[in-house]
Image: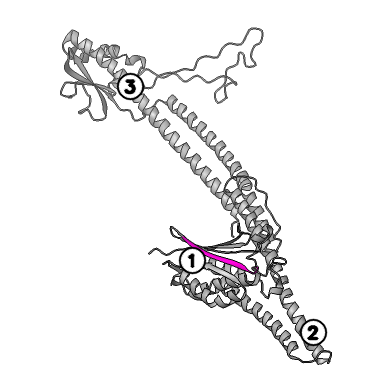
Amino acid sequence: MKLKFRHKVFLTFLLNSLVIVISMFLISRYYAFRNFEEYISKVEMQRLSELADALGQEYRRTRSWSPILDNLDRLLQVTGIEHGRFRGTAIPEERPYPPPSPPPPHSPGPHAGKHPQQGEAPPFGQLPPLPPVPPPSPEDMARHISLFDADKQPLTAGGPSSTEGYRLRPITVDGELVGWLGMKRPEHVIHPLDEEYLRVQSQTFSTIGGVAVLLGVLVAFVLPRHLLLPVKVLAEGTRALTSRRFETRIEVRSQDELGQLAADFNEMAQALERYEWMRRQWLADISHELRTPLAILRGEIEAMQDGVREVTREALDSLHFEVQHVSRIVHDLHDLSLIESPTSDAERTAVNPLEVLEETLKSFHTRFEHRDIRVEARCAGQVTIMADADRLKQLFSNLLENTLRYAQTPGVLWISHELIQDRLSLCFEDSGPGVPEESLGCLFDRLYRVDKARSRAQGGSGLGLAICKGIVESFGGEIEASNAPSGGLRIGIVFPVQPS
């Protein structure tokens, strides 16, 4: 079975919570036991030091261990073991619970005068007294505490043969080591009551861990739904885009990565909507551009077929003009598709664009003279860019053709260049007329014409500047249009320059 993404997120949060809670429980329990045992060992060693000091004072008085060893009661009296001071000796001691407080005289308890029989549970609020424990025998105590001489040899009769398994504390008298006091390490390090305390602590840790796990499950169930809500909205928006509903937008509700993703989605939808509008406009413009000359051709030919119009030289020239116009549109469309295609076959080589521009100007020299447009160009210099010479010639030819069609006569065309660091800037500026400000951003759109100044009567296809933009951008450059201070149109081109 394939898990959905929200299920994976839920399981991830749940597993993470379980690992953290179990790790905290085990670590807390481990250190609780370890620290408690270390605490008991320190307490026992402290009390062992008190015993060693007491035995040292007794030794100072007798200067011998024999009186202490011969009198076991004396030893017990000095060490205080008969009172069960040391838990580390593992000697059982009676720790009766405190007796319950008697009920007030005017409100006797429901169990007053009753004693629990054998096997019965004690009344609520009372704890059963521990059974009396017989006092330990001297032999039992002797097995847990032993005396050793300065060389760690046993002094206690019937004692151990070595100090292995004993906690040792030196006994010194006036700075002289006279013996060692040893306490046997018990099999059970802690007292049963201490074990009960640690057991309660373990239960507390377990309860806290269980509550934490439940909270983790709750968070793992709620949080993924909250986190995945923007993803669900994005998925719905994506399906809307696939249905060509490009007006779809998503509300940006946060500033995190998901919010940025929603903002990017809106930008993508806006771009798709614009491209859809451009596509429709493109189809409408193409159909209009082709329908007009085709309608003229059809009307002229049908008129000749019906005998309404004679087949004359002027009629054939009119038909030829319309055919050329259609051919020019088809040719420019083909060029534009090749330029914008990612698999364009244009080969980039090191080219000096100024030399290509100079050669192109030479081929347009006669036409500029005929139109009475003076060209002032400064095209000298050694600059190298990675481009295709034929495409560069097509770029400059379209720009010069645009000037010949639309610049007023007599007029001037200024061409200049500037090299700034690793960028080559070319400027084409005519003497007018200019272009309305609202039309400057659309000059490089396909089939766009400015009214009057950019009319179809001049014979253009409306694709020249769009082709120029495609060529410049294919070589990594930029092109823009603006109105010049002289009142004409200014076309600026920037190319990246190859380092010499």
Q: Is residue 17 magenta?
A: no
Q: Residue 378, which numbered label?
A: 1
Local secondary structure at mark 3: helix
29 in relation to 454, above or below: above
Q: Position of residue 65 (x, y in %)?
A: 18, 14
Q: What residue type is disc 1 on? A: Arg
Q: Is residue 409 magenta?
A: yes
According to the picture, the residue beneath numbered tag 2 turns out to be: 299
Give the spatial CA distance, label 3 vs label 1.
103 Å
State the quadrant of the C terminus.
bottom left
Query: Looking at the image, which is closer to me, 59 or 360?
Result: 360
Mark 1 touches mark 2? (CB < 8 Å): no
Query: Looking at the image, which is closer to me, 430 or 15?
Result: 430
The colour scheme used to paint the residues is one colour
Q: Position of residue 209 (x, y in %)?
A: 52, 37
Report the mark closest to the observer, 3 or 1: 1
The residue sitting at 59% across, 59% down in the picture is: 2
Q: What residue type is disc 2 on? A: Gly
Report the mark closest to the observer, 1 or 2: 1
Mark 2 touches mark 3? (CB < 8 Å): no
State the quadrant of the N terminus.
bottom right
Q: Position of residue 362 (x, y in %)?
A: 51, 76
